[in-house]
Image: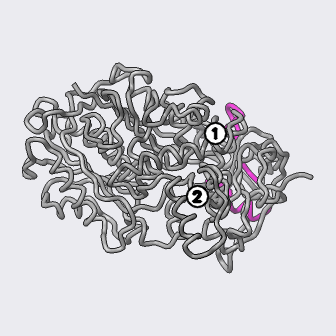
């Protein structure tokens, strides 16, 4: 069994506001995340103690016209000349940067490491974002077929629905649930339930004297092609995570010195990562992410826990179907039953297996390279009882994060324990 | 169907695969030791790491394994005339020879997507797109009526 050479703890986490910020660059967002992280360290952080920096960033090159972002982030929070390394694994960049930081501390080389995740996506028009995200797929063999990023997950959705008899409503349930959670997250891009958005549209129509939509329920609203247009059938607008600007930061230290920083450190007891074929079409299964299953098995084995032990999880819901598949890949539900779990509310904040209490990528927002690190912010809050209105009822002493790059070419899973 | 005289020299690269498509041929690579076929062609068999490959022409017959109707397309597809009002179908096709490949699917009404399309028999065709030097053949499949 693979083990870390020494224990690693999370002693601080922070994130910028997520949303669309024309006036902010990635470095502005990262400064916000860094300051938020610094404020979260119970016994204070002297930035001079930080020895190395790892930054997850998918493509500032395409989104912002800025490459070489790791030293820029380090410089802007006053950490030059420390080694600063950028990690790129598409939407898993943040989670893999976290893993690189963990491995660096576990190796014994560093005792204190800063991990960041950054992405500024809103500068480009939607066609530019579509093309930039599509490069996370295979530009030689998939993009010429017309596949977009939502298109890949839509194809997985048709394969899943065909194989397991799932309905598109099960997917919409995931979106409703994640908006319910995001409405209670002050840092989320969409701080509104679907019901709130629906009521807002009705009120606006009444105010303007326009025909008032006849939606009775959230499902009526979500079935309306006008309110919720198809993007890549069967996925509609509210099945897709948004275009987001944001950053997150995590402070890692060796287990021996964790209490010098924090009254309630989170110990990283499991880490796993795997890759898969470049093209979705080359995989034997279109209804599961093989790399996610492999990463989860590695993380569970290292941690000495099972899927059933995990109290809450932040999973990579870039699309609603992705959350359903994730809950199966992680072993929370048997293959082909994740859609039923979603419809029955098992993954809601009050259910037996809360998933994406932050609002997930869907509602909190998905600045792609930052999402893997931002997931840690939520488990930090939930495990320390600091998640405010969205705090789950029972004690969270064991939690998991699951971060996916592209269509599952990269998956990374971490397990955290509060002792 | 392999024509040794014309295929022996070509390396197992994207450029060769594209050159064949420009000639109207869908080609894959075959591991001489195991007979395993790869399309798109691979230079190395991931299962055995064997690299003694030969070109093989594929029948172009297949079935639809998964698909989507794309309403917000890639810029290349937008340039080809597709948009929210005129969506297109992209799919994963399972070839008769075994491998799967991605392609645009023609001959289905993209604005009325139907789960019953999964399993539909398809045959390969090629669509020419792009201007000037960028003009090339794109792999597509059409539904067999």
B95 on left or right of A271: right
Mark 1 and mark 2, same subunit?
yes
Q: Secondary structure at mark 1?
A: loop
Q: Which picture quadrant has residue A390?
A: top left
Residue B65 lies, in percent from the top left, at: 73, 43
| Secondary structure state at the residue bearing disc 2 | helix
Front-most of residues A10 and A314: A314
- Residue sitting farthest toward the right: B145
What residue appears at the point 37 percent right and 49 percent down from the top-left corner?
A: A184
Q: Residue most toward the bottom?
A: B132
Magenta-colored span: B10-37
Please tell me whether mark 1 or mark 2 is closer to you in this view: 2
Q: Which residue is mark 1?
A: A286
Which quadrant would the N terminus of chain A be assigned to in this image? Answer: top left
Residue A228 image point, x, y percent: 62, 59
Report which residue position mark 2 lands on. Answer: A237
**Label 1 to label 2, Cα distance in Å?**
22 Å
Q: Is residue A237 above or below residue B50?
A: below
Is residue B15 visible in the rendered structure shown here? Answer: no
Q: What sort of colour scheme is used for the picture?
A: one colour
Q: Is residue A67 left or right of residue A411?
A: left
N-terminal of the pair, mark 1 or mark 2, is 2
Residue at 64%, 61% in the rendered image: A229
Q: Residue at position x 19%, y 59% from top?
A: A74
Across and down, in percent, residue A162 comes to 73, 38
Residue B37 is tagged as none
Quarter holding the C terminus of chain A is: top left
Identify the subunit bearing mark 1.
A
Q: Quadrant of residue A25?
A: bottom left
Image location of residue A215, percent across then percent down: 64, 56
Q: Is residue A215 above or below residue A290?
A: below
In which quarter of the view is residue A246 placed? bottom left
């Amino acid at each position: 069994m693979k083990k870390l050479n020494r224990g690693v703890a999370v002693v601080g986490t922070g994130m910028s506001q997520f949303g669309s910020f024309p006036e902010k660059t990635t470095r502005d967002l990262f400064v916000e995340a860094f300051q938020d992280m610094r404020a979260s360290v119970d016994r204070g952080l002297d930035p001079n103690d930080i020895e190395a920096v790892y930054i997850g960033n998918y493509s500032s090159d395409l989104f912002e016209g800025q490459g070489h972002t790791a030293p820029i982030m380090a410089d802007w929070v006053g950490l030059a000349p420390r080694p600063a390394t950028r990690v790129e694994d598409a939407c898993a960049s943040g989670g893999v940067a976290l893993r690189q930081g963990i491995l660096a501390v576990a190796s014994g080389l560093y005792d204190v490491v800063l991990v960041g995740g950054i992405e500024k996506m809103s500068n480009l028009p939607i066609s530019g974002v579509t093309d930039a995200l599509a490069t996370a797929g295979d530009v030689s063999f998939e993009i010429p077929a017309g596949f977009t990023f939502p298109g890949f997950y839509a194809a997985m959705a048709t394969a899943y629905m065909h194989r397991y008899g799932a309905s598109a409503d099960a997917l919409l349930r995931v979106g409703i649930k994640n908006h319910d959670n995001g409405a209670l997250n002050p840092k989320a891009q969409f701080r509104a339930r679907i019901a709130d958005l629906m009521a807002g549209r009705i009120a606006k129509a009444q105010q303007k004297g326009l025909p008032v939509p006849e939606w009775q329920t959230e499902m009526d609203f979500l079935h309306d092609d006008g309110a919720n247009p198809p993007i890549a059938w069967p996925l509609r607008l509210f099945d897709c995570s948004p275009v987001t600007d944001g950053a997150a930061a995590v402070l890692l230290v060796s287990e021996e010195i964790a209490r010098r920083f924090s009254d309630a450190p989170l110990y990283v007891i499991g880490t796993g990562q795997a890759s898969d074929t470049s093209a979705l079409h080359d995989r034997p299964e279109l209804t599961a992410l093989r790399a996610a299953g492999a990463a989860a098995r590695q993380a569970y084995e290292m941690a000495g826990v099972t899927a059933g032990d995990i109290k809450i999880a932040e999973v990579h819901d870039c699309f609603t179907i992705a959350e359903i598949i994730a809950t199966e890949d992680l072993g929370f539900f048997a293959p082909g039953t994740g859609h039923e779990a979603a419809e029955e509310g098992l993954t809601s904040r009050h259910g037996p297996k809360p998933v994406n209490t932050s609002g997930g990528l869907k509602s909190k927002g998905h600045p792609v390279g930052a999402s893997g690190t931002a997931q840690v912010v939520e488990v930090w809050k939930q495990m320390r009882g600091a998640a405010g209105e969205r705090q789950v009822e029972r004690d969270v002493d064991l939690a998991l994060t699951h971060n996916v790059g592209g269509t599952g070419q990269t998956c990374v899973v971490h397990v955290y324990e509060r002792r | 169907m392999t024509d040794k005289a014309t295929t022996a020299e070509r390396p197992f690269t994207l450029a060769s695969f594209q050159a064949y498509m420009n000639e109207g041929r869908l080609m894959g690579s075959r591991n001489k030791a195991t007979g395993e076929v790869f399309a798109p062609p691979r230079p190395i068999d991931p299962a055995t790491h064997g690299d003694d490959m030969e070109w093989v022409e594929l029948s172009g017959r297949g079935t639809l394994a998964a698909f989507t109707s794309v309403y917000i397309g890639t810029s290349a597809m937008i340039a080809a005339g597709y948009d929210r009002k005129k969506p297109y179908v992209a799919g994963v096709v399972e070839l008769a020879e075994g491998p799967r490949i991605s392609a645009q699917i023609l001959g289905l009404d993209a604005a009325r997507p139907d789960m019953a399309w999964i399993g539909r028999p398809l045959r390969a065709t090629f669509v020419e797109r792009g201007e000037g030097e960028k003009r090339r053949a794109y792999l597509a499949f059409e539904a067999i009526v």
